[in-house]
Image (tube, coloured by chain):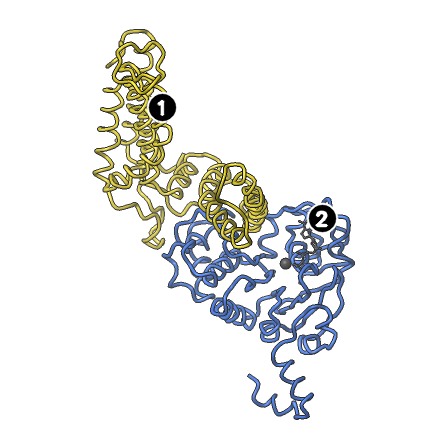
Chain colours: A blue, B yellow
Amino acid sequence: MLRLESVSYRYAGAERASLRDIDLRLEYGEVLGVVGASEAGKTTLCLVASGLAPRAIRGTLTGRLLIDGIDVAGQRMHELTALVGVCFQDPATQLSGVNATVFEEVAFGPMNLGLPVEEVVERTTDSLAALRIGHLSERDPARLSGGQMQLVAIGGLLAMRPAHLVLDEPTAQLDPAGTSLVADALARLASGGSSILIAEQKTDLLARICDRVVALDHGGLRLSGQSRAVLADPSLQALGVEEPSIVRLRRLASEAGEDPARLEEEAP
Amino acid sequence: MARSGQPISEAAPLSGRLPTFLGNPGPSAFHRLNPLTKLVLATVTAVAAVVLGGIVGPAVLLLIAVAIPAAGAGVLGRLLRTSLLLSLPIAISALLVNLFFFPGGRDVLFQIGPITATREGLVFALEILARILAISGGITLFYLTTSPQALVTDLERRGVSPRLAFVASASVQTVPAMVERASTIVAAQRARGLDTEGGVVRRLRGLVPIVAPVIMGSIAEVEERSMALEARGFTRPGRRTLLWAPADTPVQRLARWLLIFCLAGLIVARSAGVLGPLP
Ligand SMILES: Nc1ncnc2c1ncn2[C@@H]1O[C@H](COP(=O)(O)OP(=O)(O)O)[C@@H](O)[C@H]1O
Ligand SMILES: [Mg+2]
């Protein structure tokens, strides 16, 4: 279980805190969505939850990040990789840039950990299979489509076998085809019991995979609850978050005097 | 030293369970040479061309250490194009300056108005040209036949810090990305009416809104990249696992030492005055 306890974060040199008094928990096997307008603090939340802030990006953290009940404040970044893995929105900057094949790109993390060759190969093969990108093994990572690149980045993350995944808008830079490629893979991971914290603007994706959703606004938590309830909350739009299409359909139906329950029968 | 005490000449890959496509050794025998061998060859060629001076020395080096291997590797055409592009600006300015303004030039070739072209100037310019071509040819041959990954892996196996090897290779590979970003920004700024054509001053002024986003973009990108690397355990101290390493052979190791030895001998001979200047 990953837990943020009264966490605030202020970037070095910033006047205001970018996260304020956040309490959040991600249980094992749970998928937690984070929504919010741009600049609301989603990326900062991901940086803090993954331990990168303040380890790799300077700033002041107050409150605690607990993983399995243990405060990880004293741990170095490479020690956290088995506990939590993190992926960002730009697939091109996730890839190391020195690996000639997708296989080696995915193997990069386990290689960094100094694991035995057999284990590196096993983890790499497993995570390629989990994302169904084994057929890309021999390809040059720099010459993939955006969606494929993002899957390779997530594959590199899975190969570290982290207990929790933190994904910051993994489909933000992707075209519709790339988005559905990544969304399908995430849905499979989610139903396979992974613990995922995912910040995302595309609420349709969240409606599909999340158990719970929280909404951020100006660095603070505004809404928190079951995915269905939060994504249908009327105050969501005021927070700059687009409602999922099923919610919009339902709303439009009832505004038109139709019975929204009839939509439900045909909804996927 | 090699992994777990194995000899460095042991052929890649290191384990039978690895996919066979790893460490693709390249299409020709020259491509398949160990990266360090090619690096030593390029360096020795460049330094020897400078030490020898004249025209004959660098020309012979250019033929033996650059042109013939390049032809064997099937990259002669690309090599010519790249190294000419690399050396053309320096070559032209060296030619012009020396041809017309060589101090003490007596033997007049021809005159254009007040300036005279001298034979001594021409010879000197050709000498510089020969050196530049040998240097840029050697470097280009290395670049065209060696994958950065092979170089990094090989250096790492020999005990160079992986962070160091990696950063060097990654920054070389950032250059094309920066050029690409610059051209996107130029196109975008132009679409918004920015002047990147016209007089020098106007063009220079036009550069500011292009250079700033390129640099800022690169800084943000470098930050993101380094975070992604940290998240993948790259900053962990200690040895990384290598899946394969470019093959090396005792013959190549001997050849490298011979090359270095010859270069050292050449330098000593020249500075002791044993070997006079070649034409
Ligand atoms: N490196 C940084 N330094 C200072 N302030 C930052 C930095 N990154 C983000 N911020 C600020 O923190 C706030 C939250 O940003 P962010 O977490 O990126 O939001 P989101 O991901 O929801 O768009 C914004 O006001 C932003 O300007
Ligand atoms: Mg963000």
The kind of residue tagged 2 is Tyr
Residue A256: quadrant of the picture: bottom right
Tag 2 subunit: A
> For the residues tagged 2 and 1, is the chain the same?
no
- Spatial CA span between label 2 and label 1: 52 Å
The chain under label 1 reads: B
Identify the residue shown where x is 27% and y is 27%: B255
Give the amino acid type for the residue marked by disc 1 in the picture: Ala
Q: Which residue is mark 2?
A: A11
Residue B76: image quadrant is: top left
Relative to A42, residue A243 above or below:
below
- Residue A139 is situated, as x and y percent measured from the top left of the image, at 37, 57
Viewer-nearest residue: A104 or A60? A60
Q: Are marks 2 and 1 in contact (CB under 8 Å)?
A: no
Q: Where A192 sits versus B267, above or below?
A: below
Note whether residue A13 is visible: yes
Q: Secondary structure at mark 2?
A: strand
Quadrant of the rendering where the N terminus of chain A is positioned: bottom right
Task: Specify whether A226 is left or right of B2.
Answer: right
Which residue occupies the foreground of this view, B91 or B114?
A: B114
Q: Position of residue A146 (x, y in %)?
A: 47, 61
Ligand 2 quadrant in view = bottom right
Give the left or right position of residue A77, taking residue B107 as reference.
right
The residue where tag 1 is placed is B94
- Residue found farthest to the top: B273
Q: Nearer the viewer, residue A12 or B184?
A: B184
Which secondary structure, mark 1?
helix
